[in-house]
Image (cartoon, rainbow, N blue to C red):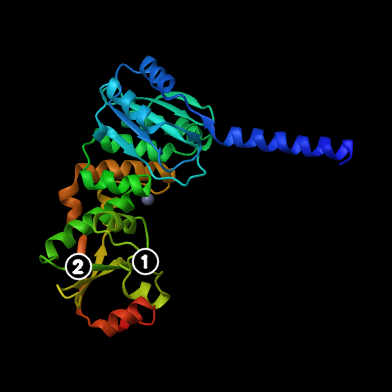
Amino acid sequence: MGRKNFLIALLIFVLILLESKLLCAELDISIVFDEAKKNLKRIDFILTNMGYSTGANVDADLFYDTARKHSISVKNIHYIHSSENRPLFFAFFESDSKDLFYVDSTGKKVKENIGFGKVVANSHEWDRKIRDKIFSGFEFSILTFTHMISSGAPYEIMKAGEFHNHICPGLWVGYLISQFIKREMKPGEDLIVFAIPPFCKDDFFQVRFDATAGKRSIYVREMRDEERKLYPDLAGIYVFLDRNKEPKRALMLGFDIKGIKREAKIDENEYPWLWRYRLNDWIVKNVRICEKSVRVIKEVSVDKEKVEKLKRGELSLKDL
Ligand SMILES: [Zn+2]
């Protein structure tokens, strides 16, 4: 190998080493906790995408030992799903003051007060912060999650929110529909979800009912034009299977999201993150009222053949 080629190869080797170091930096967890402690009076909750992000190496045992040392209960740690190529982050939250200290593997360290009233009152400033990605793109996740923690949202919404990686009105629709379904389901029955049309609600069913695509318990398709005209507020078709896994009946459910927006006085000309954030707040305070927004459009009896046709997208909803 010539001297020139050798130097080029050496340069490439060094660049690869540097890149892998940058992509997988070490985050010293004790230092991270110490800094959080310096910035907050108390640490009540931690949000993190640890276990999903490969943005940095963190010793999980050390993380739990350190959390315990700081008297943080394991139930107050929320694991926010993200793809592995996102930065690894830790967001420490103090629930009284609503102060938050954010650290991630890109080297970002930010302290912000994220009280709901304060964020809403300063929405222009916050919109700029969101566009500037002050929490590396996790702004909506962190704002919605911490506000739902502070509002005492149901466990099921927090759990599904971890998977969905934020909490939004669409996920709430999933919660409200699932409450309805739970009342409808007889002991021993199972469920197949037809996510037609699909939106955030459908991530909720995957968590609460284990209705996942891999287990062929959820089928997703958009609505055809003629179906949309016929069922403008359709929020899915829910097939109940009896003890022998035979499909017997299906409910076409509708959801009146427009009515909820009207009652909550939501202005859709607001920033998209803002009206969703405000609607979350209204829903969590009015869950009983919102439960009434679920309606049965139609109950239909189904058999195996009909359900198979639905799965393959061969059946128009107007023929159901
Ligand atoms: Zn969503």
Extreme residue toward the left, this view: 187
Residue 110 image offset from top left, x and y in percent = 46, 24
| CA distance for labels 1 and 2 | 21 Å
Q: What residue type is labelled 1?
A: Pro
N-terminal-most mark, 1 or 2: 2
Q: Is residue 167 visible?
A: no
Circle 2 is placed at which residue position?
Answer: 190
Residue 126 image offset from top left, x and y in percent = 45, 32
Q: Which amino acid does label 2 sit on?
A: Asp
Circle 1 is placed at which residue position?
Answer: 197
Tell whether 20 sits left or right of 47. right
The kind of secondary structure element at disc 1 is loop
**Is the CB–ligand 1 distance for label 1 below 8 Å?**
no
Q: Which mark is residue 8?
A: none
Q: In which quarter of the image is the C terminus?
A: bottom left
For label 1, count other residues whose C-alpha is less than 10 Å away and answer few (under 14), some (14-19) or many (20+): some
Residue at (36% x, 64% y) in the render: 213
Q: Quadrant of the N terminus?
A: top right
Tell whether 84 sits left or right of 303. right
**Is the CB–ligand 1 distance for label 2 below 8 Å?**
no
